[in-house]
Image: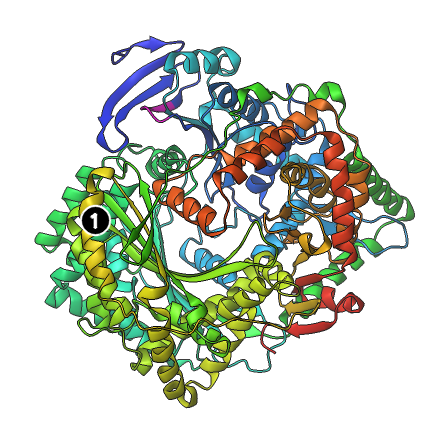
Amino acid sequence: MEYQIDQVIHGFKLCHKEYLKDIQGTAYYFEYQKTHTPLLYLSNQDNNKVFHIAFRTPSNNSTGVAHIIEHSVLDGSRKYPVKEPFVELVKGSVNTFLNAMTYPDKTVYPVASTNDKDFMNLIDVYLDAVFYPNIYKNKKIFEQEGWHYHLENPNGTMNYNGVVYNEMKGVYSSPEEILQNELFKQLYPDSIYGKESGGFPDDIPDLSYDEFLNFHRKFYHPSNAYIYLYGDGDIEAHLKYLDEAYLSDFDFQKVDSQIKLQPYFSKPVESSSYYPLSGETQLNNKNYLTIGWVLKDLKDDWLAFDILTNILLGENSYPLKKALLDLNICEDISYSYTTSVRQPYFAITLKNMMDETENIDRVQATISNVLSRLVEKGIDQKMLEAGINSAIFEIKEKDFGSYPPGLMFGLELMDTWLYDQDPLSHMRMDDAIKHVKAMAENGGFERLIDKQLIQNHHCAVVTLKPDPGLASKNAKALSERLEKYQSSLSDDEIDGIVKDTKELLAYQNREDTPENLATIPKLELSDLNAKARVPQIARGMMDDCFVLWHPAPTDGIVHLKFYFDIRTVAQEDLAVLGILNKLLFNVRTDRYAVDEMDQMIQIHTGGISTNLEVLDDVQSEGQYQAYLSIGGKALIDQIDHLLELLVQGMTASHFDEKEIIEAILQEHRTKFENRFLTSGNVLASQRLQSYYSQSAALYQQLGGIDFGRNLTAICQDYDINFDDLSRKLLRVYRQVINRNHVKLSITCEPVNQNKIYHKVKRCLQSIDNNEQTLYSYHFETEKKNEGFMTSSKINYVTKGFNIKRLGYDYKGSLFVLKTIMDMGYLWNRVRVKGGAYGTGFSVSKAGDLIFTSYRDPHVANTLQVYDEAGKYVSEMQISQRELEKAIIGSISTKDHPLSLAMQSYVADRQFLTRQTPEWTQIERDQILSTTVDDLRKCGEIIDAAMRQNALCVIGNEEKIRENQERFNELTFIQK
C-alpha cells in the first residue's frame, strides 16, 4: 500500500518516507501523536524481521542503575508474571535474536524472528516488560540482578552478591577496561560519559532500591522511547497493535533525558592509574598508555574518519602504527573509534609498554610528527584508495555473520537518532561514499587530520601501571568495608539481613506455577519445519584437487578457501606452524613489501585470512582432521588480483624481517594474555578437552595455552631465537603449502562457476606439488586439573569429559537437554543463585560434554552444581508444554538465517567432519521426537562424565588457592 506524508494510521502520523537502495526497501518515519513517540519502519522483503524499543537513559553516577534495570525488567511483568520471561521465551521461540543491551546513554531491547507469530509474541513480552515490569512489586528482583548483602547465618561472613555486580567485577579484571574507564573520566569529566553506565563494582552497592525505581519511572515512558521495525511485516497490523496494546495507555510526558555536551578543553589533560597483576615477578613492559580525543562536529565525516583510522593504524605497516612500533617501547598497538555517543571519540592505545616516563613524550611527539607530515605532504593516494575500497566492499557485502542485518541497521541508526539528528543519515551509503571519494580528491582527509587531531586540544593522555599487590589490597579493603558495616549492625539488624538472604534464596528456588508459565506465548511443534536445513553444495575435482562448490546469489562476490592438510608438518614443528599462521600475508613476498601487500589486499579484495582448524569426525570417536585454511574474497572483476595475491602469500613469502615479525608476535602475545581475563571460559574448555582428547591436545600446540606459552618464551629471548625461528618458518611453510594435500572451497554465482574454475586452476598450478611425508601425531594426555591464577576478581569454571570414550553415543535429545540446562538448571543455580554472569552446558557431536561458567564468583559451589546435574536430569519432572518449549528452542538455533559466508563455512565443516545430510536429518528427527524419558536417560551420561573428575579453572588467585585440593597443578599464565 502507498502511504502519504501526514497520513495518520492508528495514531501514527507519517512524517517522512524514502527509498533506501542499500536495504532495497522504503523507510517510513512516523510519530505517535498521543505520546510523541517516534517510530522508524524499514520495509523490505527480508523475512528476518527485527523490532527494538530503545530508551535514552543517561545516568549521573556509576552505580550501574541503567544496566541493572535492563536485567531486571525482564524478570516478570503484568501479563507475564513468571520469574524469568526472557528465559521462558528463549525455550519456546524460533527467534533469530533476543537480548537487551545497555550503552553509555541508551538501553536497547531488540528481538528478531522469521516467523510472524513468533515475532509478535516476542514484541509483546518485551513491551510488557519495559512498561509494566514487576520490579515495583518485588524488591528481590533488584537484589538478585543488582546487588544485595548476602549472609546466610548470623555468625557468617557478609558478602555482596548480584548478577550485574559480579559481571562488572569480571569486566574490571581487564586492564584494558580499567584504562578505558579512566580515559572516559578524563575526556568527559562533566558529562554522563565520564560515568560507568554498566556500574563500577565499588559503586554498585551505593544504589538504593528507591533510586532504582525512580530511574525506571523517569526514563521508561513512550515519550522517551524510540521504536524501530524492519523487514517484510504488515505495517498497518504492527501499528495497530502498538497503538491498541500499549501506547494508547499513555499520555505525553516531558522527559528530561537530553545528553549534555562536555565543554571542549583548551589544553590536553593527563592522568595515571594502576591495575592488578598476579603471579608476575617481572613488572617491566607491563604499562598501558592511551591517548584519546573527543572529535568536534564530525557530522558527514563519520565514514571518512572511520576510513582514516584504518589508513593510519589498520596494519603494522601503516604510517602511524609503524612509526609507533619503530620506537620499540611496546608490544601491541590498537585503536578505538565510535560514533555511538553524542560526542564521538578516537583513541590510540599502546599495550605492554616500557616504564620510562620519557616514552610518553616520545609517543606524543611521534604522533604529532607523523600527522603533521601527512597533512603537509599529503596522504599517499594508494593508501586512500585502499582504505576507501575496503570500506566500500564491507558496505556492499553486508556480512554480519549470524546477526540479522536489520538488527545491525537498527543499532547503527541510533548513532544519530538518539541525538535528535537524521536517523537515516548513516543508511544513505551512496551519499557517504561519494563524500569520501570527493574528500580523497580535494585534500579532505588531510583537513580532517588537522581539524580533529592536530588542532584539537580536547585530548587526554592516560597511563596505567601494574601493581602486584593491588588485587589483595582491594580485596582487603572490600573485606574491611563489609566487616565494618557488619560490626555496626545490631543483632536484630543482622537477623534481618539473614532473613532477607533466606527469603531471596527461597524466591530463587521457587518454581513458577503451571498457570504462570502458560502465560508465556510459544509456538507449536507443528510450526516447525521437519526437514533439516541442508546447504547447497557440489563436489568435484580440479586436476587432483578436491573442490567443494557452493552456488549462491553473492551479488558478484567470490569466496575462496584453501584447506591444506597440516600432517605434512612434523609434531615437533607444530608450534612453528601456529606462528606461521599469524605471519602469513603479514610479511614481505617476492613481489610486495609488507605495506604494499596490505594496500593491494584492501584495494582489490574484501580481505584475506588464515586459520588453523582442528575438526573432530562426528562418526568415529577419536578421529579428526586438521587444516591450515587460507581464505579470500573479491568481486568477480577483481578475481585475478585476489588469486595473484593468494599465490604471492602462499608461495613467495619471506620470514627474514626481524623487526616486523617481532611486532606481530608481540601483538599476539598480548592478545593471548588478555584472553585469560576476557574469554577464560573458552580457554579453560579447550584446555580441559586436551586432558583426554588427541585433537584438543593438538590444538593446544597450534593456538591454545601451550601455544601462547611457547610464543611468550620466543618473545622473551627473541634476539637469540630469531635466526632459528626464521629457518623453521620457511621449512614448515614449504611443507604445509602443498598442492598434493589441499582441498578447495568456492562460493560464487552459478553463472561465474566456469570462469572461476579456469582461473583457480591456473592458481593451483603455481603451488608446489612435491611429495611430502604425512605424519601421525600422538600426544601424552593426562588429567592435569589445572587452576590458572590471574588478577581477575571472578572465575571461569569448567568440567567435563568425552562421552564416546565412556561408551555413549551423541543423540539429538542431548541437544534438547542443552536448552533445559542452559535456561533452567544452570541458569537458576549458577547465574541466579550463584551470581555468575553466564553459564552453559554443551555436548558436541564428537562427544565432548562440557559445563562452563562465565564471570563466576564461585569455584566449589559451581563444581557441586555440575556434579549434581546428573541426578537432577535423572529425576527431571517436566510437563509436555515445557518439553515442547525446549524442543522449539533447540530447533531455533539450527534454523537461524546465515550470511552467505557463514553458509559456506557451515557446509565446509559439515562435509569435513562427515556430518552428512542424512546424519543431520537423523539428529533433527531425534530432537523433534525427544521424550521426557529420553532426557532422563541422559542423567546417567552426565554422571559418568562427572565421575571422571576432569576440570579446569581460570580465575581469581585467592579463590583458586582456597580450593587447591581440587587441582593437580596451580599455575599462572606464564609458568
Q: Residue at x 79, y 56 (%)?
A: 947
Q: Which of the colour schemes (rainbow, by chain, secondary structure, one colour) is used?
A: rainbow
As drawn, which residue projects farthest toward the bottom? 720
Q: Overall secondary structure of the magenta stretch? A: strand
Check disc 1 and report its element: helix, strand or loop: helix
Residue 638 coordinates in the image, percent (x, y): 17, 51
Residue 269 coordinates in the image, percent (x, y): 39, 64
Pick the front one: 807 or 66: 807
Dividing the picture into quarters, in which one does residue 933 lie? top right
- What amino acid is at disc 1? Ile
Residue 495 in the image: above or below residue 786: above
Task: Indicate left or right for 927 with 316 as reference.
Answer: right
Residue for badge 1: 756
Residue 742 coordinates in the image, percent (x, y): 35, 61
Dividing the picture into quarters, in which one does residue 410 lie? top left
Residue 470 in the image: above or below residue 438: below
Task: Indicate left or right for 835 with 362 as reference.
Answer: right
In the rendered structure, which segment of residues is drawn in magenta?
A: 39-46
Task: Check residue 812 for magenta coloring.
Answer: no
Asked if one can make out residue 367 in the rendered structure from this viewpoint, the answer is no
Residue 854 in the image: above or below residue 648: above
Asked if one can make out residue 900 in the rendered structure from this viewpoint, the answer is yes
Q: Quadrant of the C terminus?
A: bottom right
Residue 395 in the image: above or below residue 307: above
Q: Residue at x 66, y 63 (%)?
A: 692
Pick the front one: 955 or 164: 955
Residue 140 coordinates in the image, percent (x, y): 73, 35
Dividing the picture into quarters, in which one does residue 254 lie? top left
User: Alpha-carbon neighbours of circle 1 within 10 Å: few (<14), some, or many (≥20)?
Assistant: many
